[in-house]
């Protein structure tokens, strides 16, 4: 997706129109993400320690949930796919932790205060540069809906997880109407209408819970915990608030799963 100098890589030849459109949309989402994080780095200059404490609390909470299933040694092999600007891996407490993100080189410069706590590689989640079964724990926290091929990332999470290893996965899910709006947004941008609506420009897809379940279904993963938490809309102040109760957005879906031995056909 990204060239060594930080620019967007050229499109692969021979791809169909829809594939090229998807590629361009993912590249644009990356550009917007980088611009947003550059602005954030400027906004929190001198206050990065405060942000670090918040991220530390979230990371430790995720680790504690996994350790209720099985203790994790300090030298556990831990991978975060989409470690981003301030991912879980930087405070996860593993001496063998590593993060992967297409913008990793940029983030190391923008958020040096905590990015140095774990090594990171610039790579895409659809093609992880690791052998199968390389990690005891894999983390993926609100990543796949910013990517070119979400289902391919989910398959890679399972591939690099060792048998018996634990997966923590999170993504926001939405009412199907937002998925339709997202596809329409991508189409009109692909046809040259440069009208970007922020939530749809920052994300490549707006997924439903059923769509995420279908991504997991063929994989050698056994789900141990799964939850979907909708945002509390509070007291309805006008008809729009009532609509939000039905056409919900940004419900937090979390999955903890264990990697089972690969199933072989009889």
Image (tube, helix red, strand yellow):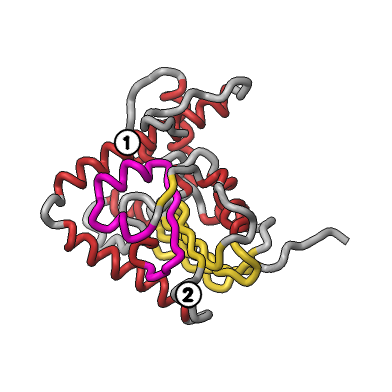
Q: Residue 9: image x %, image y %?
A: 46, 27
Q: Is residue 150 magenta?
A: no
Q: Which mark is residue 66?
A: 2
Q: Are marks 1 and 2 in contact (CB under 8 Å)?
A: no
Query: Does 111 sit left or right of 88 as displayed?
Result: left
Decide if residue 149 is in sight here: yes
Q: Nearer the viewer, residue 8 or 172?
A: 8
Q: Which region of the structure is painted magenta?
A: 92-118
Which image quarter: residue 12? top right
Q: Residue 199: image x %, image y %?
A: 34, 41
Query: Does 54 sit left or right of 228 as displayed?
Result: left
Question: Residue at coordinates 42% horizontally, 68% vertically from top-left?
Answer: 95
Q: Residue 89: image x %, image y %?
A: 39, 61
The image shows residue 55, relative to residue 184, as above or below, that is: below
Report the Cα–Cα distance between label 1 and label 2: 32 Å
**Can you identify the residue that label 1 sits on?**
32
Q: Nearer the viewer, residue 150 or 48?
A: 48
Compare marks 1 and 2 and give the one earlier in the sequence: 1
Question: Residue at coordinates 49% horizontally, 81% vertically from top-left?
Answer: 71
């Amino acid at each position: 997706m990204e060239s060594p100098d930080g620019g967007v890589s050229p499109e692969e030849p021979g791809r169909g129109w829809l594939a090229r459109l998807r590629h361009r949309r993912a590249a644009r989402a990356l550009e917007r993400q980088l611009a947003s994080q550059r602005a954030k780095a400027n906004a929190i200059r001198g206050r990065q320690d405060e942000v670090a404490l918040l991220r530390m609390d979230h990371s430790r909470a995720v680790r504690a949930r996994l350790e209720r299933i099985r203790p994790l040694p300090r030298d556990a092999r831990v991978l975060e796919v989409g470690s981003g600007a301030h991912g879980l891996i930087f405070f996860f407490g593993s001496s063998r932790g590593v993060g992967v993100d297409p913008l990793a080189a940029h983030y190391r410069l923008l958020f040096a205060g905590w990015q140095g706590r774990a090594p990171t590689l610039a790579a895409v989640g659809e093609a992880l540069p690791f052998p199968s079964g390389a990690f005891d724990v894999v983390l993926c926290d609100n990543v796949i809906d910013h990517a070119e091929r979400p289902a391919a990332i989910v398959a890679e999470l399972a591939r690099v997880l060792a048998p018996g290893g634990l997966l923590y996965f999170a993504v926001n899910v939405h009412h199907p109407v937002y998925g339709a709006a997202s596809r329409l947004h991508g189409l009109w941008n692909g046809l040259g209408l440069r009208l970007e609506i922020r939530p749809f420009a920052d994300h490549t897809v707006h997924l439903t819970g059923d769509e995420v379940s279908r991504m997991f279904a063929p994989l050698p993963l056994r789900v141990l915990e799964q939850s979907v938490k909708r945002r509390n809309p509070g007291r309805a102040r006008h008809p729009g608030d009532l609509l939000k109760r039905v056409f919900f957005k940004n419900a937090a879906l979390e999955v903890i799963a264990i990697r089972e031995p690969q199933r072989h056909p009889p």
